[in-house]
Image: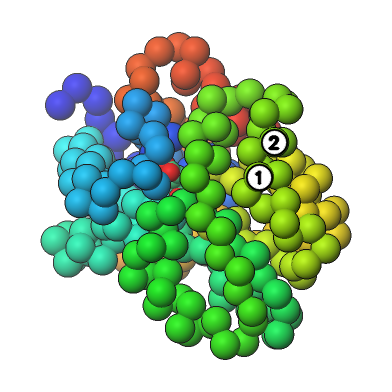
Amino acid sequence: MSEDFTGYVGMFDSGLGGISVLKECVRLLPHENFLFFGDSANAPYGEKTRDWVLARSRQILQGFLARGCKAVVIACNTATSASAATLRLEYPDLPIIGVEPALKPAALAHEHDRVLVMATPMTVSLDKYQHLMSEWGDRVEVVTVPCTGLAARIEKGNLEGEDLHELVLSLVGDYRGKVDSCVLGCTHYPFIKPQISRVIGDDVPFFDGGAGTARQLKRLLEAGGLLNGSCDAGSVVFRSSIDTPEELALYQSFFERQI
Ligand code: DGL
């Protein structure tokens, strides 16, 4: 194993979307060291099979362990739905933190609202989402939209194109003026809040799972006595299955974006 990341928090996504979660984690835990792996060569996960995503998530987690990581954040709603429960059974001593569509905070914020949930086709088809719906779906009216193609489009990196607007319009254009809030149930989507607002309306508030995931990471590191004791700023290292300087520069530029 070539690289040593002992004591780092390993974090992964199908690509650069998970950087939206990484930003929240770094904000809350500035002294921690993070190794972010984007599986961009295999994105999008949300249009693959559950078994494939589970096997790939297990492989990535094993790579983190082999490099000495102390905890793993699955910064992907799709991979969390497909793999988190199984991996926690397989690795009971490893803190494994996942991300889920933020239906709970949306429901708690405004009861009886009409909530638009945008997520990948796999996330909304799996039992984890059905469970969330049975827990919170009676407090609010939920409109679920599987957003085929959207994560793959964001993964390209250029967020300015009119084609992106057309895609968002085709997915959620019908809900303009008809929803009170919007849950971004895929970690890629926080990067296109302005494009989504342009379609559904500027006054619709967003909820995503990034901040909750960061809080859960902090809780588990504290509980396990695993917090980094250093007072120095932690480091953030990017790796990708598209192993080119251009791809890593794209990750860095997304890390520096305001969202
Ligand atoms: N960013 C991921 C998620 O949160 C996956 C998107 C994809 O690869 O389909 O669901």
Left or right: 10 in relation to 202: left
Residue depicted at x 17% and y 66% = 89
> Pointer 1 and pointer 2: residues touching (CB < 8 Å)?
yes
Mark 1 — residue?
170
**Residue 5 visible (yes or no):** yes
Residue farthest to the bottom, as pictured: 138
| Mark 2 CB lies closer than 8 A to ligand 1 | no
The spot of residue 125 in percent (x, y) is 38, 63
From the image, which quarter does the N terminus lie in? top left
- Distance between the Cα atoms at labels 1 and 2? 6 Å
> In front: 31, or 28?
28
Please give the label number shown on residue 81: none
- The kind of secondary structure element at disc 2 is helix
Q: Does ligand 1 reach within 8 Å of label 1's beta carbon? A: no
Residue 133 in the image, given as x and y percentages of width and height: 48, 77
Three-letter amino acid code at the position of disc 1: Ser
- Residue 242, given in percent of the width and then of the height, sits at 36, 20
Please name the residue that numbered disc 2 is placed on. Answer: 166
